Amino acid sequence: MEYIFSEHPSVVSQVVAELRDTNIQKDSFRFRENLERLGYFMAYELSKQLKYEKISVKTPLGESLTNVISEQLVLATILRAGLPFYQGFIKVFDKAESAFIGAYRVEENENSSELMINMEYMASPSLSEKTLIVIDPMLATGKSLVKTCKSLFKYGEPKVLHLVAAIASKPGLTYVKQQLPKCNLWIAALDNELNDKAYIVPGLGDAGDLSFGVKK
């Protein structure tokens, strides 16, 4: 399935507008808070697609039947930009396990627009028969997200795969669907194009730099 939040007006659109706003971006604390809020809202919507089971809860005055998530969840995010976004998800899915990936893109050389993805760190629990939710703010070319997922699969084949992005490009979304046809996609906003440096336009810039300071 594919769910584009911007096609269904909600408070998510307001949060995305603040994430894009160059004036609000000057406050890195506010930017991180907005990414976390966005993760919280998107996690709630995603939760509606999970499987549940009924349990009995004892109260001071009796017992109550209620639905609780029956799937084993693993939340995965790409360092460092994904951390605030991930925080919103872990607050909703507080019983989930977590995986962390250190990946970044580099240009092959100064005169080339060809991008390479370097992956230098990965820590994950077993994914066999679990529901994997991969959380990354920016889905630009889609290459880092696809490489991350395929690398995670060495920890076991998940039963269900959800991919979440704050902003995606149409070319990147197409690439991901071709490479991971069985995934479920959750996108807060979808932009039309990439520039010659493979950044999303209009996008919002570099989510990692805006959250934590410009890297050297």
Image (spheres, rainbow, N blue to C red):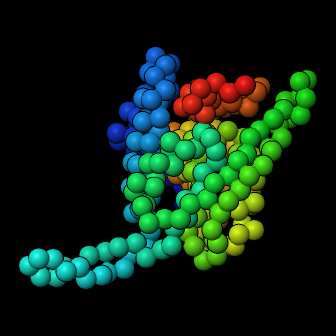
Question: Quick check: can you spot residue 213?
Answer: yes
Residue 180 point in image, percent of width and height: 70, 60
Residue 108 point in image, percent of width and height: 89, 34
Point 84% across, 32% down: residue = 107
Point 46% across, 22% down: residue = 27
Residue 9 point in image, percent of width and height: 37, 40
Point 64% across, 24% down: residue = 214
Residue 212 point in image, percent of width and height: 57, 31
Looking at the image, how many numbered discs can be counted on the residues?
0
97 w.r.t. 148: above or below: below
Question: In the depicted view, which residue is nearer to us: 108 or 169?
Answer: 108
Quick check: 65 left or right of 73? left
Question: In the depicted view, which residue is nearer to us: 196 or 213?
Answer: 213
Quick check: 34 left or right of 120? left
73 w.r.t. 210: above or below: below
Point 39% across, 75% down: residue = 52
Quick check: 30 left or right of 203? left
Question: Quick check: can you spot residue 17?
Answer: no
Q: In which quarter of the image is residue 162?
A: bottom right
Q: Dividing the image into 4 quarters, which one contains the N terminus?
A: bottom right
Q: Dividing the image into 4 quarters, which one contains the C terminus?
A: top right
Q: Going by the picture, which residue comes out furthest to the top?
A: 23
Q: Going by the picture, which residue comes out furthest to the left?
A: 61
